[in-house]
Amino acid sequence: MGYRNPTPIQRSTIPDAVRGRDLIGTAQTGSGKTAAFLLPILERLIDHPPGRIYALVLTPTRELALQADGFLRQLGRHTRVRGGAVYGGVGMEPQERALRGGAEVIVATPGRLLDHMSRGYVDFRSLEVLVLDEGDRMLDMGFIPDVRRILRNLPSRRQTLLFSATMPPEVVQLARDFLHEPRMVRVEETTVAAAGVTHRALPVPQHQKTDLLSFLLKDPSLTSVLVFTRTKHRADRVVRQLKQNHVDAGVIHGNKSQSQRVKALEAFRRGYHRVLVATDIAARGIDVEGVSHVINYDSPNDPETYVHRVGRTARAQRQGIAITMVTREDDDEFSRIEQFLGERIPRERLEGFRYEEPPRHEPSPPPRGGRPMGHGRGGPSPSSQSSGRRSSYQPTSRRW
């Protein structure tokens, strides 16, 4: 699989995990947390008799469940340990077979697992290892009550591993309630973007974002591009416009069925789609090697969302480019992102792209938190042009 040396989180957690100690591991996305818990599980279960559930991995999204289950199959291909993924949006019968003895390791989302547990046939009496993956994301998505319900039905004598990109107070309290004298492992600052990411900012009027995106995609060096939008409607609209411009693009967001999301993600992973447009549901659910560029079509609402988005590139110590389209209305929020990262992100205007002022008859966009900004709104204000703030917006020609 290409492994040569353990990542810092793997080096710091695997020895204690193999010895059976409870652990709390905190590290940024793309740091190798999945292998940090799957390898010790496989080591532990390699000689166990089949037909019982020995390990349970709880994860917040369907994409993460599929990703961890697929990774387990790769790591354990020369063992007899079987895995099963349990998540919503698909039929329950294959999952029921896995839960009734068809798998020794279950990777599940909390809601669907509770659905199966309510039917009375899920037997966790042999469980030895519990993993809570992406604990902070569980909190963000409102799954902590479901997680607590599941944990109360598991054997008290077990090993518990909790992994998270950040450690908010609610997740810390969960760890205190359900982990036994855990060792805390914190690798680097969890709020800092991957070191291999080069950050760029493109000031642009709102109504020209799609034109600028199409202009960027003319550069063949953008080989595998993940584009983030703020809303599902906008994601669909951007994909339609890209296809009209003859750009191969897929889309993934919460309104798509599970089969549609899996199909789009697989097409992107295999290179059939050069571009994947996504909402933030994908910020931690996509693990695709070789994403060359992340483009923030819509600037994220908060710095941590920015970190998780751009963490889809430069994974596992690789290099990548993060480009953010910044409108006049985004200036304050983007400044907070810069403060969060501790660096000034260069603003650049692309040579060869024809910038326009927004139509004068268009009203200003509503404040952030209102209805989504419509097509054709926004743009640089006269005051921003006259301030020193625009002094760094010098036209440059870059090949990204």
Image: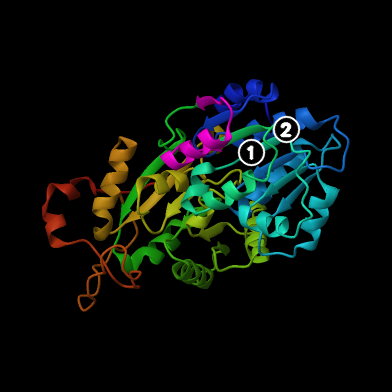
In front of the other: 330 or 284: 284
Q: How is the image coloured?
A: rainbow
User: Where does residue 59 sit, x and y in percent of width and height?
Assistant: 61, 47
For the residue marked with disc 2, what is the amino acid? Answer: Ile
Judge left or right: residue 316 versus residue 325.
right
Residue annotated with mark 2: 41
- Residue 350 seen in this snapshot: no
For the residue marked with disc 1, what is the amino acid? Answer: Val
Question: Could you say whether the residue bearing mark 1 is in a helix, strand or loop?
Answer: strand
Residue 264 sits above or below residue 191 on the image: below
In front of the other: 183 or 329: 183
User: Where does residue 191 sit, x and y in percent of width and height?
Assistant: 40, 37
Magenta range: 163-185
Q: Residue at x 24, y 64 (%)?
A: 379
Residue annotated with mark 1: 131
Q: CA distance from mark 2 to mark 1?
A: 10 Å
Q: Residue at x 55, y 34 (%)?
A: 31
Q: Are marks 2 and 1 in contact (CB under 8 Å)?
A: yes
> Which circle's residue, 2 or 1, is located before the other in the chain?
2
In front of the other: 190 or 167: 167
